[in-house]
Amino acid sequence: MIHLLYSADYELFLGGISQPEESVLIEPTRHLLERCEQLGIPLTLFADVACLWRYRDLGLERFPELAEAQLVAAIRRGHDVQSHLHPHWEGTRFENGRFLFDPANYLCGTCAPDPKTRQLRTRAWLGRAATHLEALLTPHAPDYRCIAFRAGGYGLQPEASMLLAALQELGYRIDSSIIPGFSLHTAVQQVDFTQVPREGNYWLSPEFGLDNPAPWGQGLFEIPIGACRFTTPERLAVRLPEALRQAWGILLNQATPTTRGTPCNGGATVSTSAAGRLKRAWWRFNALMNNNFQRLELGTDPRPLVAAFQGHLRASSYQKGQERPLFVALNIHPKGIDTRHLDALERFHATLWRHHAGEIRAITFQQANRLIETLRSDA
């Protein structure tokens, strides 16, 4: 059986916002939840609660109140909410829609020069996140527990063992931060998942780190965000239509949806001259065609998602009818979606349920935890 966990990082843009918080996060999430309910999909929201703490520290109550009301409503309607941590919010300054912070504070593993201080801060943040969510949600769902974690920016590194130890000590049961094969190094991120196991699911512990599975039942259960590398024929079939569409849109200077904010790495100034458009179109076409890596991150075209899902099954050595279930997550960032994404989600879901009829189901992380506990007790 394949258990697909539809999930969303419930967060603002980290570099700044150009619209009110309601437009950036609350409304897109409302539309996402509504579409998921129409499709019979339970969604797990990984809530960036440190952002809510910072808003309240600065006396800005409206956004946290709206966000928490939405999380409560989601739980009441059968969805799930789990922990997503961006620790840099603790010292972030707000200036005219921009969020300014020291890049060294973006990750738990770099948040202080001293290892002991990093450990204490990480443990405090993770404990506060779980306590916050349980205090908010348990009155509306008595069996609710904060049992799953996704690192902000997928930042389990550096100091992965320190972070895993803190999660384990505080009662977290599942991690969903890893994208197998993914690597990204920026001013704030230090992600390298190129050596992680490709077993589909495995256990993580401080003693074995990220690259070696722990003994069965020891540590945290990893439910990765699905990913694969395309073969050349797959890349041509999947990338070419989208590459042509995007390049043509740039050449015609077609309007794109108004951005709601900027990422923490900023963005380049875009030239709209004919020469500038030609250069951008050529760069974009080549960037897409030369990229053979795809993760299960919702976009506007369902074809890469379907191909990535099938590739993830192959890489995980999944066999139809196998005794051990496979758990895999798809991720969504509501702050960046519109109706095109929701339509792609619907087509992706319909395609998978047609191709894998009878062997796939959509579940939450709470439901996954109950299944995993059963597997652990039976082992």
Image (cartoon, helix red, strand yellow):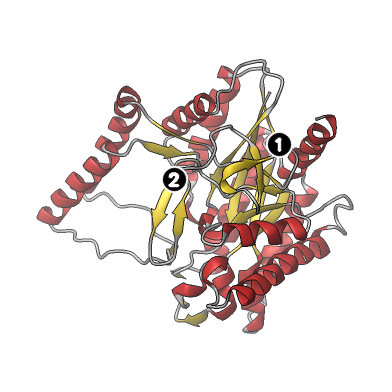
Q: Position of residue 121 (x, y in %)?
A: 65, 74
Label whose residue precedes the other's in the sequence (1 or 2): 2
Q: Quadrant of the C terminus?
A: top right
Above or below 151: residue 352: above
Q: Find residue 86 and report its image quarter.
A: bottom right
Q: Is residue 268 visible?
A: yes
Q: Quadrant of residue 134?
A: bottom right
Side (left or right) of 86 relative to 270: right
Of the pair 149 and 52, the residue shown nearer to us: 149
- Residue at image position (79%, 65%) is 131
Q: Secondary structure at mark 1?
A: loop
For badge 1, the amino acid type reads Ile
Image location of residue 220, percent across then percent down: 70, 47
Query: Which quadrant would residue 42 be assigned to in this image?
Result: top right
| Local secondary structure at mark 2 | loop
- Let me know if residue 252 appears in the view: no
The CA distance from mark 1 to mark 2 is 24 Å
| Residue type of the residue flagged with mark 2 | Phe
Extreme left residue here?
A: 275
What's the residue at 65%, 70% (across, down)? 119
Which residue is denoted by mark 2 in the rendering?
182
Residue that mark 1 sits on: 363
Task: Name the spot of residue 218 as percent of width and height, x first.
Answer: 74, 44
Q: Residue furthest top?
A: 321
Mark 2: give few (<14), some (14-19) or many (20+) Cα within 10 Å.
some
Foreground mark, 1 or 2, reads 2
